Amino acid sequence: DINYKEHLESEAEDINSIYSQIEVLFSELKNKPEEVVDKLLTDWLDYENYGVNEYVARKLGEASSSYPIVELKLLENLHNKSSCWYSNIVLALGYLRNASQVTIDNLISLVQNHEDKIICLDAAKALIQLNIYHDFVLNQLLFLFKEPEPNKFDYFYEQDLNFNSQVFEALVQLGQTFDEVAPALAHWIEQNQGKDYTEQGIDALWMLIEGSTASQL
């Protein structure tokens, strides 16, 4: 379909233009760091495309080693919990170079707050990215699993399965640098046999085992 192809080409051009604008902003950091960081946070970390969000978060993390204002601004926005882009702030904190103890303490607090499991998971991923507090993150992730509702055609059932899948992905990521994940996950599977989400745990365990085997070849 020609129209669909043209639509895809137009979208690709738009995204390329966005990345170019972001690169220009980062090149201006040395001249007006606070203004540039504010614009990156409000215009692009909050953009309606996750790929763009991820890219900006990574670039901000790289810039944080030279520009302390990056971490300060992220922490400032972290306290605005009504923000719809709260998860993206947490994402960016995970890419900081030499994150301060203030940032680490904030992430730990978010991981322990089980009232919002999505933010809890985001904060756990940030700590994994920072490569710290492995034992703590492992225990918290295993605590996060949701028992899906029994109606398999229910929207919330699918939502819970998707959330659990993200938890398992985080465990696999953690397992790449922390050897205790595989035995802990195996023990968890044994304790939760017969539950709907156990199969996802088995898949995650196999990914860890295969990854470990491949690294030894």
Image (spheres, rainbow, N blue to C red):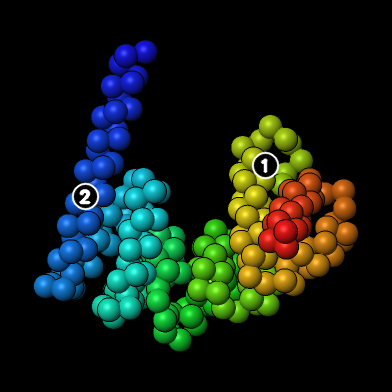
Point out the image quarter for the C terminus.
Answer: bottom right
According to the picture, the residue beneath numbered tag 1 turns out to be 157
**Can see residue 147?**
no
Badge 2 crowding class, 10 Å Cα cut-off, few under 14, some 14 to 19, many 20 or more, is few
Q: Secondary structure at mark 2?
A: helix
Classify residue 90 by image quadrant: bottom left
Q: Secondary structure at mark 1?
A: helix
Q: Position of residue 5 (x, y in %)?
A: 33, 21
User: Residue visible at 28% across and 21% down?
Assistant: 6
Badge 1 crowding class, 10 Å Cα cut-off, few under 14, some 14 to 19, many 20 or more, is some
Q: Position of residue 88 (x, y in %)?
A: 40, 60
Residue 149 bears which disc, if any? none
Name, please, the residue furthest toward the top.
Answer: 1
According to the picture, the residue beneath numbered tag 2 turns out to be 20
User: Residue visible at 26% across and 29% down?
Assistant: 10
Q: Position of residue 67 (x, y in %)?
A: 26, 78
In screen coordinates, is 75 left or right of 126?
A: left
Q: Amino acid at mark 2?
A: Ser
Note whether 213 is above or below 132 in the view shown: above
Point out the image quarter for the N terminus.
Answer: top left
Instruction: Tell me the CA gap for discs 1 and 2.
Output: 40 Å
In screen coordinates, is 126 left or right of 46?
A: right
Asked whether the residues under the numbered discs 1 and 2 touch, taking CB atoms below 8 Å apart as contact, a structural biologist would say no
Q: Position of residue 25 (x, y in %)?
A: 18, 60
Q: Amino acid at mark 1?
A: Tyr
User: Residue visible at 84% across and 65% down?
Assistant: 187
In screen coordinates, is 114 left or right of 87?
A: right
